[in-house]
Amino acid sequence: MNEIDVIRTNHLVDPALHIWGWEVPVYLFLGGLAAGVMIATALIAAAMPLRQRSAALRWLPFAAPVALSLGMGALFLDLEHKAYVWRFYAALRLTSPMSWGAWILLGIYPATLLLGLASLTDQDLARLQRFLPGPLSRWAAGAQSWAQHRELGLRSVNVVLGLGLGVYTGVLLGAMGARAVWNSALLGPLFLTSGASAGAAFLLLFRLADHERRELARWDRLALLVELGLIALFLVGLLNGSAQAQAGAHQLLGGRFTAQFWALVVVAGLAVPWFLATFEAKKHSRPTMAAPLLVLVGGLSLRWILVAAGQA
Amino acid sequence: MTRYAMAVDTVRCVGCSACVLACAEENQLPEDAYRCWITTETRGKFPVLTQEIRSERCNHCTDAPCVTACPTGASQVTIGGIVVVDHEMCTGCKACMGACPYDARYVHPDGYIDKCTFCVHRVERGLDPACVANCPTKALIFGDLDDPKSPVARLTVERKSKVNKPESGADPNVVFLI
């Protein structure tokens, strides 16, 4: 028997090691979703000229900065010293994933907004300009003309920044050696894949053309399978790690977070939507919103459960 | 090069908490906030029991993960390897708290992250940290680990010693004499 008694009357630290609340998983989810939307809209647009794209697909690149802003809003709420948020941009510290992540976020706004403008037809732009004040409206027209001549480059920038953002959401946790459940290099690719499937699932909630829907559904099914494989490797890695890592794995394999993890992430968030999407594709049945919604629930649950498990 | 370290003599420590209170007083900590704490570890099965009492705090690690995790440079290494937080640079993002293997940090009510500083303001004046100066059993020894003549360097060689969570790889500078 080994009993450890700690007298540390600091209610801010003890008895729980919980430092991050709902804000961080929500930010990681929305950041991953934004990354997925960036990559999916940039790649799917590469395969079809502007006139073949549905109205929804033309406008959806703007969903990435909106999702990211909501996520960053959640992150801002988590800061204990909100007035010092600008400090993130007074330093670039390469050893800190949070630091280079903050700089990536800054690059995403111009890249996504310009790609969004490049994806609009002249009629779309005229509709947008009706909601913009004079100078901004003129700027949008100029920016659209600039962006449409550089669409290929903008798509590449969006894919690269989307990959960076998706990986960063996982590395943010993965770099924390003190928390065994998080300390895995696989969290980067896992969160990137989960973000990619969440992004595609989000796009599938809108009224897309049939060929766009087929392409995104195919993308989503592949991402779900890769994610399932990465989760298996992540658990195997923990089980073969230190005693602390093994204890972390047992939280998901029989311990406190087992039911939530397997029910919400693996079954409801991965297996069921994969079967639904595959069934819809094979039987050419009318697609429903069930599979995309389940993927989104699974993506949020994955981050929520892993953030909580690392602090238990 | 100077490398400040603290030796905690677990044979002498009685867990009286004088270090905890001296620290709170010296550093004007808010109510209910403490930078050091007492851990009592009981091993064995009754009636064959052994007990170890440790006064614990930030380990001022040589490879401090809190410093590398900090996105703004607020967590930084100062004289003699002492790890401090610049309150004016801290956003309270808590990345350092997530990275710390020893859970030695907490959120100060003023919004920054706070922890033990080895009383660097006293060390700069040639004084011992408040916890060391106030320990009634002389269980805490502070000094330069890189100076072979210093008591802390000598004791860690002469006595059997250990550090908490050596597997963290952070190379902690609080050593427990056993």
Image: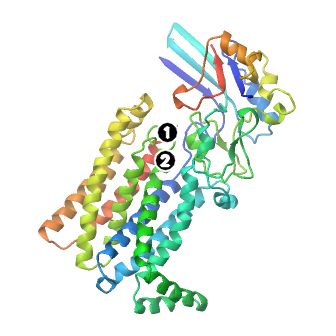
Tell me the kind of residue under disc 1.
Answer: Arg
Which residue is drawn at the image coordinates 66% and 25% (left, top)? B174
The residue shown at (28%, 50%) is: A228
A305 relative to A6, above or below: below
Task: Determine crowd level at label 2: few under 14, some 14-19, many 20+ residues with C-alpha closer than 10 A.
Answer: many
Query: Quadrant of the rendered structure where residue A64 is?
Result: bottom left
**SS at badge 1:** loop
Image side of residue A13 versus residue B155, left or right: left
Q: Are marks 1 and 2 on the same chain?
A: yes
Q: Residue A239: x percent and y percent?
A: 35, 33
User: Helix, strand or loop at disc 2?
Assistant: helix
Say which of A202 and A218 sits in front: A218
Q: Residue at x 78, y 20 (%)?
A: B135
Q: Which residue is mark 2?
A: A173
CA gap between label 1 and label 2 equals 9 Å
Residue A51, x across and y down, in percent: 31, 87
- Count numbered badges in the picture: 2
The reply to whether the C-beta atoms of the residues labelled 1 and 2 are less than 8 Å apart is: yes
Q: Which residue is mark 1?
A: A179
Asked if A123 appears above or below A71 in the picture, the reply is below
- A165 to the left or right of A99: left
Extreme residue in the right direction = B125
Give percent across and percent down for residue B54.
65, 21
- Chain letter of disc 1 in the image: A
Residue A30 position by quadrant: bottom left
Q: What amino acid is at disc 2?
A: Leu
Subunit bearing disc 2? A
Residue A253 visible in the displayed image: no
Estimate the x, y position of residue A255 in percent, counting from the top left. 37, 36
